[in-house]
Amino acid sequence: MLTSIQKDVLTEILNIQIGAAANILSEMVDQKVILSVPELELVTGSTLELDGVKYQQIADMTDAIATTISFEGEFNGTSAIVIPQDKASSLVNVCLGGDPDQDIDVLSHEYADVIKEISNIILNSLLGELGNIMDVKLTYTSLQVGSSIELLDARDTLPQDPKILVLYTSFFLTNSQVRGVVLIALSPASYDMLVDRIDRMLSDVNV
Amino acid sequence: MKIMIVDDSLFAQQYTKKQIQQKYPQAEFMLASSGQAAYDTFLSRRPDVLITDLLMPGITGQKLIAMIRGIDTTCKIIVLSCDIQKAVRDEIEALGVQCFINKPLKDDNIESLQDAIGKG
């Protein structure tokens, strides 16, 4: 369990990075981006049963598009961004300069490539910063994009006995809302390492 | 000037090409979607500038840079990556690249690229 102050620190770190990633996206699509305040929770389990995650908002996440990236080294695990199908379509259309409501097959090669690249920017922004604050190097393995059911229910996707940080976030582009869930599944040792670093940050500021 | 862009994302390739083309309208572009394709193209066409992503299936950008630096020290190599880790930047810079830029290429960081390869 994270204490409320630990959760506060981690949410703040991740929020800053989501903001940085949204800013990049804003420049790429040349649209203003308004962020919502993200919420963070910690879940455990050998697979990620998305329909079991408590948040009502992501009830449609089982039929969604996921991009996953694994990272190795001293700090290791798997991270994913899960975006509902319709929001993913919207995001792709906006990135390609089209009508956000145009109906497309997001998992076709051309469109999946766009989702993958945007997710890559966001995940690198989040995970890279965690690596930076802990002063360790994360070695990424290649990205995968696919249906959330197929990618996240696979037992070999996640580390053993993972601690999964779930970050609910959404942002609004001028013509569309994009919301999704970022999952950071850590091995128990990596999770402890992160919590330890957070505690030291709190101690540095006498909290 | 011959510029090769290496990225396994076609979207990223096109986006990067478009940004660079605005600054270097006369440049000749080559695109590669993998480290192996990039290396083969490098051997046959010898670009002046190579712009590469790092995380790619098969031959990664890091390995590609090492392979190219093993046979050529004159080609200007720019890394264009989402990876924001300081440790990675330090490691890549030690391979003899001209600069390391975080994706995407945009107005405020394309100047670093211009400084590295010249104004064309």
Image: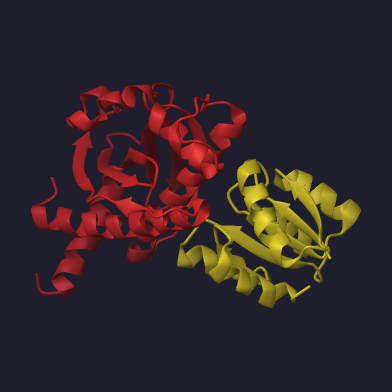
Q: Dividing the picture into quarters, in which one does residue B65 lie?
A: bottom right
Q: Name the spot of residue B31 as percent of width and height, x first.
A: 75, 48
Q: Is residue A143 visible?
A: no
Q: Residue A17 versus residue A77: which sits nearer the camera?
A: A17
Chain identifier of the yellow chain? B
Q: Residue furthest right?
A: B44
Q: Dividing the picture into quarters, in which one does residue A60 lie?
A: top left
Q: Name the spot of residue A72 as percent of width and height, x first.
A: 45, 47
Q: Name the spot of residue A21 as percent of width and height, x first.
A: 41, 55
B80 relative to A191 in the view: left or right: right
Residue drawn at x 18%, y 32% as measured from the top left = A55
When the figure is inspected, residue A133 is found, relative to residue B114, above or below; the finding is above
Residue drawn at x 63%, y 51% as measured from the top left = B15
Q: Residue A24 versus residue A79: which sits nearer the camera?
A: A24
Q: Dividing the picture into quarters, in which one does residue A150 lie?
A: top left
The C terminus of chain A lies in quadrant: bottom left
Residue drawn at x 36%, y 40% as measured from the top left = A178
Chain identifier of the red chain? A
Q: Residue A92 versus residue A175: which sits nearer the camera?
A: A175
Residue drawn at x 49%, y 55% as measured from the top left = A30
The N terminus of chain A lies in quadrant: top left
Q: Is residue A167 visible?
A: yes
A161 relative to B103 in the view: left or right: left
When the figure is inspected, residue B80 is found, relative to residue A46, above or below; the finding is below
Q: Name the spot of residue A74 as percent of width and height, x first.
A: 39, 54
